[in-house]
Amino acid sequence: MRVLSGIQPTGNLHLGNYLGAIRNWVRMQDEAPCFFFLADMHSISEHIDPAQRLTNVREMTAALVACGLDPERSVIFNQARVPAHAELQWLLNGIARMGWLNRMTQWKDKAGKNREGASVALFTYPVLQAADVLLYQPTHVPVGEDQKQHLELTRDVAIKFNTDFGVDLFTVPDPYIPKETARIMSLRDGTAKMSKSDPSDMSRINLADDDDTLSQKIRKAKTDPEPLPGEAAGLEGRPEAQNLVGIYAALAGTTPDAVCAQFAGQGFGTFKPAMAELVVAKLAPIRERYVALKDDQGALDAILIEGARKAAEVAHPTLLGAYEAMGLMR
Ligand code: TYM
């Protein structure tokens, strides 16, 4: 078993990232060799001020360590320091099909009506993601539901490469998407996912929010006037209530059924303060570690430089194998 996953270093880490992905990364460190990276090469698909990009990478590194990723046990790095990612992407551009990329929902959503004006990097984003994964031969890729389609494309690229060149070079990886936290939804709209790009900060819980902000966001979260049912099945058709109960259960380490049993018959006037207390208790220690780390540029860069050295070592044989299989090197 080998684990790999990545995150875009844009803005704050939010509860969707944490429950959907990072908490599982932290747990998997005990089970297998792990590789986790900041997708700074992906971030060029949109224009960001260069100084801001560097800050984002360091801050996201601090956030991951604050959540419990341990640079002694896991390889933590940023893509830009491991040129094998860009090299393998170019090789895989010969494998991926325009039709596959045209079908990607992230491309359709982000480019919107302005396809002509979108960057080429936004279109070929999933090919870089395939390179990220395939370089390290992982068996498990822990992600949220929104990355499933990109990982299916990664599998298609691996299978087509192995078949076209008659080799057994790439491990075909499995996404690892625990059902309960696969999609954490916005606090303002239970049908939209919690996202960095939502213009309303009230829609998401950021791991760096202070206690008052956390409580206020939960107090103002959209709900309905009905009391909580005795079991989770009764939340069907109530997306906001379902989301809050799901978040509560995930943070408390229990099930939505147990949360419903605990609050059965009570309204959100009772549930929300209990939820605010739980969220503050779980997130405050992470925030404190984050604040202590985030300006220590030297320590954060040292983590990334050492991680990149280890990552490059593991990536090298696979990259060489790809050059050889394609007749570019022998
Ligand atoms: P990104 O940066 O958007 O998100 C990082 C991780 O958080 C998960 N996530 C969620 N999970 C549940 N509910 C939500 N509301 C929610 N929002 C985000 C994402 O599914 C993801 O697991 N393209 C990737 C980064 C990437 C990558 C890779 C991932 C680049 N190369 C290779 C895996 C393997 C991205 O933009 O994730």
Image: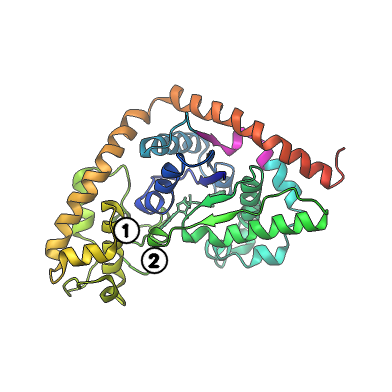
Image quarter hosting the N terminus: top right
User: Residue 41's quadrant in the figure?
Assistant: top right
Q: Nearer the viewer, residue 222 or 162?
A: 162
Write down the residue under mark 2: 192
Q: Amino acid at mark 1?
A: Ser
Horizontal side of residue 321 vs 110, given as left or right: right
Q: Position of residue 10 (x, y in %)?
A: 46, 45
Q: Is residue 119 visible?
A: no
Asked if the residues shown at circle 2 and circle 1 are in contact, with their CB atoms under 8 angstroms apart, the answer is yes
Q: Quadrant of the C terminus?
A: top right
SS class of the residue under badge 1? helix
Query: Which residue, as the protein is rendered here, is positioned at the far top?
Result: 298
x 62%, y 55%: residue: 126
According to the image, label 1 marks what residue? 203
Can residue 292 be seen at all in this image of the molecule?
yes
Q: Is residue 198 above or below residue 45?
A: below
Q: Residue at x 31, y 71 (%)?
A: 239
In this picture, which residue range is highlighted in magenta?
74-85
- Comparing 245 with 54, the one in front is 245
Q: Residues within 10 Å of mark 2 (few under 14, many from 20)?
A: some
Q: Is 75 in the magenta? A: yes
Measuring 66% from the left and 62% from the top, which residue is drawn there? 101
Q: Is residue 152 magenta?
A: no
